[in-house]
Amino acid sequence: MPAILQEDDFLQRMLPAFDDAIAPVLAVLDNLPAYVDPRLAPADFLDWLAGWVDIRVDEAWSVPQRREIVAGAVALHRRSGTAGGIADAVRLAAGPGSTVEVVESGGIAWSPTPGGDLPGSSELAVTVRVTVPKRSLDDGLEPRLVRVVRTLVPVHVPCTVEVRTGGGSGS
């Protein structure tokens, strides 16, 4: 501030009010990378970040699970609709210790023999088999996983989700 204004008593009393009002904004801007990194962002900020990457947050997900899903969303979107992408997304939604197997009809395939039969089935279908540790099975898990699978599988393809418990700790 110029020297002449430093002597003004009125300004000296009023400027701290602006400092108090602007300080939180500056603190957020100084720490912006911590807000947009899902592994560092405050827990209440994760839902907003999920909206940025087109993830519908399920209230049953724990905070660490939300962080992992939001952090991996871009990679999941890149593989969306593929058997590997479906398996990865369902594995994240099912939680730690889960295994996922995706069985598809083979809608896109080729044959090394001209005029030969194509592998797979002519009927489109996707079956997702999820094995979760017994301790993580709850009544709402299967509907949540069905919702995840339905968002990833093309609408015209019938899909089935089978959830079963495996061994693991807590059984």
Image (cartoon, rainbow, N blue to C red):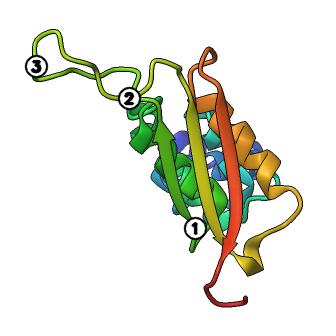
The x and y percentages for residue 26 are 57, 48
**Residues at marks 3 and 1, CA–CA distance in whole angstroms:** 39 Å
Q: Which residue is mark 2?
A: 120
Of the residues shown, which amino acid type is indicated by label 3?
Thr
Q: Which residue is mark 3?
A: 113
- Graded by Cα atoms within 10 Å as few (under 14), some (14 to 19) or many (20 or more), the crowding at tag 3 reads few
Q: Residue furthest right?
A: 139
- Graded by Cα atoms within 10 Å as few (under 14), some (14 to 19) or many (20 or more), the crowding at tag 2 reads some
Quadrant the C terminus occupies: bottom right
Of pointers 3 and 1, the one earlier in the residue sequence: 1
The x and y percentages for residue 40 are 53, 62
Q: Which circle marks residue 98 in the picture?
A: 1
- Which secondary structure lies at badge 1? loop
The x and y percentages for residue 110 are 21, 20
Of the residues shown, which amino acid type is indicated by label 2?
Gly
Frontmost of labels 3 and 1 is 3
